[in-house]
Image: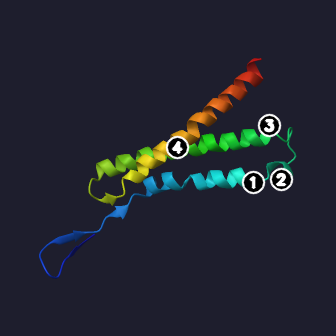
Amino acid sequence: MSKKNKSSDEVLVHKKINGWSLTSLLLPVIFIVVLLLPWPSMFILRDDVLVPRFIRWGAAFVTGLFMIITGIIGLVRNKKNAGQYKASWLGIIGIILGAVFFLPSAFFLGDYLIYTFLS
């Protein structure tokens, strides 16, 4: 979308925000909601301590994975349509935060599953 400036012949280009990059930055809201839910009082769980932690680490794992995926898609779209989108840093921050959510949760979930099923 472009407009002509009335005082000169310059063309003003209105850039839009890349939705994929913005989504990668806003996905931690889902994790915060899952973190605040009182799982033992909502459902009958096998263990009131371990299962809610497993649910929360699983939510961090999935949220981090989606943040990394949407951040990469956003960066590819920024590169493909250069000059059309503003705030390309949103995708980079989304990937970094996604890694912060994904890596520790993958370690704890993997450790739990290995300890549970292989011992």
Q: Is residue 21 left or right of residue 112?
A: left
Q: Residues within 10 Å of mark 3 (few under 14, many from 20)?
A: few
What residue type is disc 4 on?
A: Gly
CA distance separating discs 4 and 3: 24 Å
Mark 2 vs mark 1: give the one in front.
1
Specify the label residue 98 is tagged with: 4
- SS at mark 3 in the image: helix
Asked if marks 4 and 1 touch (Cβ < 8 Å), the reply is no
What residue type is disc 3 on?
A: Leu
The residue under label 2 is: 42
Most extreme residue toward the top, as rendered? 119
- Residue positioned 63% across, 50% down in the render: 31
Q: Is residue 83 left or right of residue 116?
A: left
- The image shows residue 18 at horizontal and vertical percentages of 39, 57
Whether residue 41 is visible to the viewer of this picture, yes or no, is: yes
Asked if marks 2 and 1 touch (Cβ < 8 Å), the reply is yes
Q: Earlier in the sequence, mark 3 or mark 1?
A: 1
Q: Earlier in the sequence, mark 4 or mark 3?
A: 3
- The image shows residue 116 at horizontal and vertical percentages of 77, 24
What residue type is disc 1 on?
A: Leu
The residue under label 1 is: 37
Q: Earlier in the sequence, mark 3 or mark 2?
A: 2
Tell me the quarter of the picture where residue 3 sits: bottom left
Q: Is residue 94 left or right of residue 56?
A: left
CA distance separating discs 2 and 4: 28 Å
The residue under label 3 is: 50
Most extreme residue toward the left, as rendered? 9
Mark 2 vs mark 4: give the one in front.
4
Q: Earlier in the sequence, mark 2 or mark 1?
A: 1
Q: Residues within 10 Å of mark 2 (few under 14, many from 20)?
A: few
